[in-house]
């Protein structure tokens, strides 16, 4: 069943409902709710829906594309000093400067060229940017992300050769497989590499992701309805 776009009056209610579910699942796992960051995925959403979510008090948003995010958030960043923007889509190295300038967290580091570009721009802009490595847990050829077999060496490369601090790992499970398997796998990979951040879980499976240790969940349609 297709999710319809929500009325503006429903958006505040949707945020409350999602936060209530986060709190309930976190408590059932004996985890503090404060340990879980709700990233509202605002890509392709209309201006009035973004403003409604800001009016509801939310300040953490995720975008897939740098140029689209610049149009939507460049001015709003001046209006809301506590705003935190997360890049959750693929990044090209020629967009590294704009990405570091606009975003506070990048979830999609997946190859040496990107790691080098981000580290260089962060140093030039004197900005402490939080980074996650995207892992292709299903080894899907069409999907971004580093292969699990190459992860440990890539983490070492980022930390030791590039000087890029890595906060954790991110994954997008294959659509035709049980998400929980991939959430558990990502948790294991993070533990092996002494990483605590886990960016995983979307509208349909964020509760399960929390049970497997997610620290960042990326929720779109459950908050905004379908993109128009």
Image: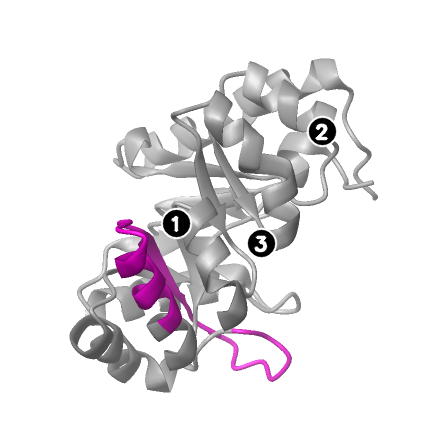
Q: Is residue 105 above or below residue 195?
A: above
Q: Seen in the image, is 225 located left or right of residue 106?
A: right
On the question of residue 64 being in view, the answer is no
Q: Is residue 81 above or below residue 168?
A: above
Label 2 vs label 1: CA separation? 22 Å
Helix, strand or loop for disc 3: helix
Going from N to C along the chain, the mark reached first, 2 or 1, is: 2
Q: Does the magenta portion include 150?
A: no
Report the disc number at residue 105.
Answer: 1
The residue at 66%/45% (across/down) is 43
Q: Please identify the residue farthest to the front as the structure is shown.
A: 124
Which range of residues does the magenta coloring cover? 117-144
Label 1 crowd bin: few (<14), some (14–19), many (20+), radius 10 Å: many
The residue at 31%/67% (across/down) is 120
Q: Position of residue 29 (x, y in %)?
A: 31, 39
Helix, strand or loop for disc 1: strand
Q: Position of residue 180 (x, y in %)?
A: 47, 59
Report the disc number at residue 47.
Answer: 2
The residue at 26%/32% (across/down) is 32
The residue at 16%/76% (across/down) is 160
Going from N to C along the chain, the mark reached first, 3 or 2, is: 2
Quadrant assignment for the N terminus: top right
Label 1 vs label 3: CA separation? 12 Å
Q: Position of residue 159 (x, y in %)?
A: 20, 71
Q: Are marks 2 and 1 in contact (CB under 8 Å)?
A: no
Q: Seen in the image, is 138 located left or right of residue 225?
A: left
Q: Seen in the image, is 77 located left or right of residue 163?
A: right
Per the image, the residue denoted by label 3 is 66
On the question of residue 26 being in view, the answer is yes
Q: Quadrant of residue 165?
A: bottom left
Label 3 vs label 2: CA separation? 17 Å
């Amino acid at each position: 069943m297709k999710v319809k776009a929500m009325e503006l009056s429903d958006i505040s209610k949707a945020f409350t409902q999602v936060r209530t579910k986060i709190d309930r699942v976190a408590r059932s796992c004996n985890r503090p709710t404060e340990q879980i960051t709700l990233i509202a995925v605002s890509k392709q959403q209309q201006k009035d829906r973004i403003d409604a979510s800001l009016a509801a008090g939310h300040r953490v948003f995720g975008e897939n594309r740098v140029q689209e995010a610049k149009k939507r958030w460049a001015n709003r960043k001046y209006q809301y000093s506590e705003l935190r923007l997360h890049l959750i889509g693929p990044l090209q190295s020629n967009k590294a400067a704009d990405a570091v300038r606009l975003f506070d967290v990048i979830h999609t580091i997946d190859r040496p060229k990107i790691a080098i570009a981000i580290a260089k721009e962060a140093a030039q802009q004197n900005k402490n940017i939080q980074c996650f490595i995207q892992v292709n847990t299903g080894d899907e050829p069409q999907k971004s992300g580093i292969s699990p077999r190459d992860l440990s060496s890539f983490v070492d490369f980022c930390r030791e050769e590039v000087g890029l601090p890595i906060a954790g790992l991110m994954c997008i499970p294959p659509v035709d497989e049980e998400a929980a398997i991939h959430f558990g796998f990502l948790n294991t990979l993070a533990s092996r590499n002494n990483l605590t951040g886990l960016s995983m879980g979307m509208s349909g499976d964020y509760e399960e992701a929390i049970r497997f240790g997610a620290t960042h969940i990326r929720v779109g349609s459950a908050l905004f309805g379908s993109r128009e």
